[in-house]
Image: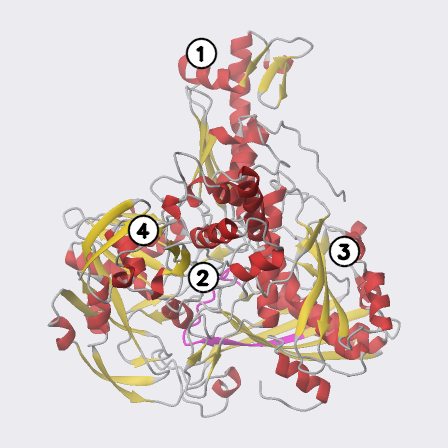
Amino acid sequence: MQITVTVNGTTYTSDVEPRRLLVDYIRNDLGLTGTHIGCDTTSCGACTLIMDGKPVKSCTILAVQADGSEIRTVEGLKRDGQLHPIQKAFKEHHGLQCGFCTPGMMMVGSALIEQNPRPSEEEVRWAISGNICRCTGYQNIVAAIQAAGRELAERG
Amino acid sequence: MTTTVHPKTSPEVGGIGHAVRRKEDDRFIQGAGRYLDDIVLPGMLHMAIVRSPIAHGRIRSIDTSAAEQTEGVVAVITGQMLAEHNLAWMPTLSGDTQAVLATDKVRYQGQEVAAVVATDPYIARDAASLVFVDYEELPAITSPQQALEPGAPVIRDDKEGKTDNVAYIWEAGDKEATDAAFAKADVVVTLDTHYPRSHPSPLETCGALADVNPATGEATIYLTSQAPHAHRTLFALVAGLPEENIRIVSPDIGGGFGNKVPIYPGYVVATVASLLLGKPVKWVETRTENLISTGFARDYHMHGELALTSDGRILAMRASILSDQGAFYADAQPSRFRAGLFHICTGSYDFGAAHVTAKGAYTNKAPGGVAYRCSFRVTEASYLIERLVDNAAWKLGMDPAEFRMKNFIRPEQFPYRSPTGFVYDSGDYHTALREAMKLVDYEGWRRKQAEGHPEGKLYGVGIASFTEVVGAGNSKEYDIAGIKMFDSAELRIHPTGKAILKLGVRTQGQGHETTFAQIVAEELGIPYTDVKVQEGDTDNTPYGLGTYASRSTPVGGAATAVVARRIREKAKKIAAHLLEASEDDLEWEPGRFFVRGTDKGVTIQEVAFAAYTNPPEGLEAGLEDVCYYDPPNMTYPFGSYIVVVEVDPGDGTWKVVDMAAVDDCGVRINPMIVEGQIMGGLTEGFAKANMQWITFDEQGNCIGSNFLDYLVPTAWETPRFKLGATVTPSPHHPLGAKGVGESATVGSPAAYVNAVLDALRRAGHPVENIDMPVLPHRVWGAIQGVAVKP
């Protein structure tokens, strides 16, 4: 089936098998390997990307379902050579160790703070409760997302 | 003991003690890490594994024809084909054998039976489902107790003359002295507990991409490996490939936690497939494959006893272990120690005698026994003693903190020889516990507990004061599959004063690219940002045993310090030449030699340039060296964790309302990274205490084969942690550092469990034990005094 999707500002038209998962399309067909696969059951969130403004788990969406949509992946966080506040905050607050969950965490986190730049700790924990990190214990991830929100808010 | 270490270098240089931000983060935050599944090679094929759906059965036949006829399938590989190359079986890290692809029997659900190689991963999986295997099902053995019953079916009938299911028998300590001490005891406290089967489940599963050059036979094998050098040697020994033709590349690793220490059948089959087909072959596990077939952890059935005086002194300890090894004995551990370092189970306490016996049984479960964020069974050991000590205090009517203080090894007793033969290098256990009590406000919580919870819930306070043993070797006592447990560092200072440090260890998120650069910065004054750290490629790094059991800083870190000091010695000669002074007149300050009493000096960068452009006569050009460090002893990190919980007696649920963790890992190279390691470990400790386990039904079906059934904590469940530190340097480590990556996983589970039990006991429920995970129905059953299903 032919699909047209816009990923990080570039529009792609591709022929895909109806059963092809969006995550495989993004990783293997478009070569955007920053989006990861950690489970097959929508549990871990490593494959999270932003589709039409909402964070979604791309391992449980078919590529054909993304037809006509606008997608943002971790590779699209940086704009005009400037890191997104969430990228800077994850480094500053030691919000990552092995880095495998990090793109998914940052995509969820960025979606949250773009709606609500001053989330409470509870709100952050709830927002990322669909994302698993096996290294950090989450405390620094929460701090990073809150700090990024503050930066975003101060920028206005 | 101190609580702070003041850095000697400037923040720009970033030596020891600076919480500099991690260099590796720049690629990870931009999605530019390169993990195994991100690597694509021209002409690459994809492999899927056909696995046994049953736990125990004889293979009658395998029909591969439908799979072979599928368009896009290039090959179907069976055990029979491997047997022709003598590769159907491989050695495990514990000196046992393991089937690569089953030829005779399957021995656990999920065991590898065949592999399909295709042009596309979807096709490979489709075709794998078309391989038809006819099994004669045999009764499954799902517990070690069942395995040791007389007449139990022999799982390992592949082993000649094997008539039972015993995997190993081992003991440590002094039985006679222990028996004598027990004979004098006023009180004996016993505990039977099962440390349940768990799985490290790093977020990135295991995988391999094998690329064997059809013309030269050179094999480049990309591997999710915590120990690439050891794996290269094992590949050479197992597959009979010449070692110079094998290059293992361990790319960015998405977490390991011990899961990526063993060699798995998939690695071997992918390599054989590439060898046979002349094309690169990639194999990446699904999450289910990871959980049902690769290295599990724990699964120790433990019996412990403490001999006590009535006034609260420990006299001796007995422990006996029955371990569930699964179908192949594959613990990743030093070969002399059949139950790993479990005999550290005397913990932080000073008493005269201990005796430990251990027996392992084969069962129809996946093999493994890996050290999941743990140094070779130290987690089980720490759990047993910390639970026993808590029960002892309870039985004697003493406060658990007071009981611990009374029995701790005292600071002046170090180095301390434990009753099972370890020599603890340094410690100050009393201070660590006092600091933790202050941090959590122990007395305050005890008061609140006595006053009662405003909503009728039950407060409980639990302590664990662990001692770990990490950083293997020395090489005399410790080896893995015969390879001695040293580790290495090669440091090259370039002419412009920048450096590359090549290590035998392999980071999986621990921050080596920053921490090890900081060691060079400390020793040579070269800014950590100017030091590139390279690991994981066996062609480009010196030989080492890898990263697990918290050994990178104790061994690889020591090697880095030593090699940097050797380079400083050579640099001094060059500096003397440049300054036209005698070496004896030179002094060192971070980054610079100067002539004593003058302002005449040269920087390390100027020296580096001269090493290549203007070396003194009689001195070899260049500024590089390599060190293979053989540690004189292990390091013994320790700490005290205190957990406060709130138990709802109505439904048995509990949550952590406060937690303080005071760790002493000696000198902290990067305090931020150390704290990150501790918070991660505290979370994994909580996971095991609260929710995370793998069980099997009576047919041997794995329950917990995905993240819907195998519960790992998210941010929502995970407690908040307060961290504290004491610093008691290791006397034998060149930097005074100890390992830290696993302390919190090792130490914390008992603190959570002790807290829940404390809540129940202080509310008048005399509960001896609740096994982990401390699930609500178990707590409720304990309160009600009724038996509940496990």
Q: Percent x, y for residue B192?
A: 66, 80
**Mark positioned earlier in the residue sequence (2 or 3):** 2
Instruction: Name the residue beneath numbered marker 3.
Output: B436
Q: Which residue is mark 2?
A: B259
Q: Amino acid at mark 1?
A: Glu
Near mark 4 (Cα within 10 A), the count class, few <14, some 14-19 or many ≥20, is some
Where does the magenta region start and end? B319-336
Answer whether residue B326 is magenta in the image. yes
Name which of mark 3 and mark 4 comes first in the sequence: 4
As measured in the structure, the alpha-carbon distance from the residue carrying label 4 to the one carrying label 1 is: 50 Å
Q: Chain of mark 3?
A: B
Q: Quadrant of the N terminus of chain B?
A: top right
Residue B326, percent from left and from top: 44, 76
- Disc 3 versus disc 1: distance between alpha carbons? 58 Å
Which numbered marker is on residue B753?
none
Element type where label 4 sits in the image? helix
Which residue matches tag 1? B617
Identity, as a three-letter code, of the amino acid under mark 2 = Asn
Along the viewing direction, whichever of B321 and B161 lies nearer the viewer: B321
- Quadrant where the C terminus of chain B sits is bottom right
Chain on which label 1 sits? B
Looking at the picture, how far across and down is residue B476, in whole percent? 54, 52
Residue B15 in sight: yes
The residue closer to the viewer here, B521 or B205, is B205
Q: Magenta includes B48?
A: no
Residue lying at the far right of the rendered structure:
B311
Marks 3 and 4 share the same chain: yes
Q: Which residue is mark 4?
A: B38
Q: Nearer the viewer, mark 3 or mark 4?
A: 4
